[in-house]
Image: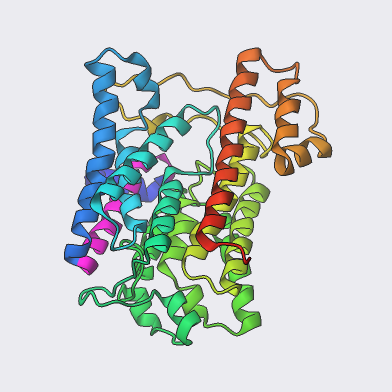
Amino acid sequence: MKARLQRFLAQPELEDEGLLRLACTVLLAAAGLFFFRQRALPVLLGCMVGGGLLLALLWAGFHRLGMRPFGSYWPGLYQGLVTAMLVFCVMPPGIPPVLAALLAALAVAIEGVERRALVPLAASGVTAAWLLAWVWQSRTGTPFIAPFDLHVLDEPVTLWVRFSTAIDPVRIYAGQAAGPLGATSFGLVAIVTLLLSYARAVSWQAVLAFYAPIALLCLVDRLPLHVYLVDGPALLFAAVVAGQSRRLPRTVPWRVATGLLGGVVAALMLAAGSGYQAFGLGVAVSTALVSVFQFFGLAGAPGVLDPTLAAADEVPVPEQVVVAPRTGRTSAVQVLALAAFMPAGLVMVWRDGGLARAQRMALVLMGLVLYLTVVGAGLAWLWVFRLPG
């Protein structure tokens, strides 16, 4: 143990990121359980059962049922457990345990599907699970609660927007403010972020770029900096969920653009009177858009599948797939078509003679899934907030 700690201090980037991320996530989940006690325990159990059952199903399908393709959807034991616990950390206190289990299973399944992609994708199953949980909370009107005494209390941003009341920054830092179960303590999330960033597992460029537009909004509108910046959910979404170095594009400009886009979306929503959900929606928009560019090879140098994502629990890991850069330059028209008008981009991909037919079909199918997801999210947005008649 001592030798491993010395290796981590000397060369942290060479150690197992999955194990470190699991330890950090356990710390966040334990804090949520400490702060919210009986309100958090059923949700945590639900998430662990849902994620664990899906992992067990994939393992049993591969080892016991003869369903060999299941092995390719194995996200890795560490990654599966981290995903399930992060889903717990971003859940509201009143979410039903059964729904939490389903959302955790969905998040783990998305991580397994993304593992088959030729390049890492910025979007994550945790963000997708949180989006559904947030829609459920907004439709049911379930309130947040204060830690320990569990009385109804708005989270700090919403409290400021509604009543111009700023919570003491010490309470926000120490975890005595209302909010998602595992993200109320900014101090604890900051410690986790520092540990992960020391191991080169968090992109500081993306995190700082995310905070820049929000800080500018606070200065222009004279909003309390500690409410909007010293905010547990903001740092959790920006760093632990969306700031993972292995999921972001390699080039610094793309990482800055990812964080900046999320920060701009969050700042606009905060200016319109939104609460903490502005941070999650900003991350969801930026990572989804960047993932489209990553998938089509437009986000700088392509990455390599990370073999550490799949645990060595006898589940075979496919050989590393290195995506070679495509020859030629992508025109501005192609980029605009892919980003702003997906059907045109799909047609251009389908007609690209430089791609094999199977690869063209896979790209177009993924593009259609993303396009339908965006359209469905837009319709869900209209359904939740309703346009004025």
Q: Position of residue 384 (x, y in %)?
A: 50, 59
Q: Is residue 175 visible?
A: yes
Q: Position of residue 37 (x, y in %)?
A: 18, 65
Q: Please give the name of the residue rendered at 49% of the width and 58% of the height, measured from the top-left corner.
A: 280
The colour scheme is: rainbow
Residue closer to the observer: 38 or 11: 38
Q: Is residue 306 visible?
A: no
Judge left or right: residue 360 versus residue 59: right
Q: Quadrant of residue 53?
A: top left
Judge left or right: residue 239 versus residue 45: right
Prevailing SS of the magenta stretch? helix
Q: Please give the name of the residue rendered at 26% of the width and 27% of the height, measured from the top-left corner.
A: 57
Location of the N terminus (image quadrant)? top left
Q: Quadrant of residue 346?
A: top right
Residue closer to the observer: 287 or 169: 287
Location of the C terminus (image quadrant)? bottom right
Q: Please give the name of the residue rendered at 29% of the width and 42% of the height, measured from the top-left corner.
A: 81
Q: Which residues are magenta?
A: 13-36
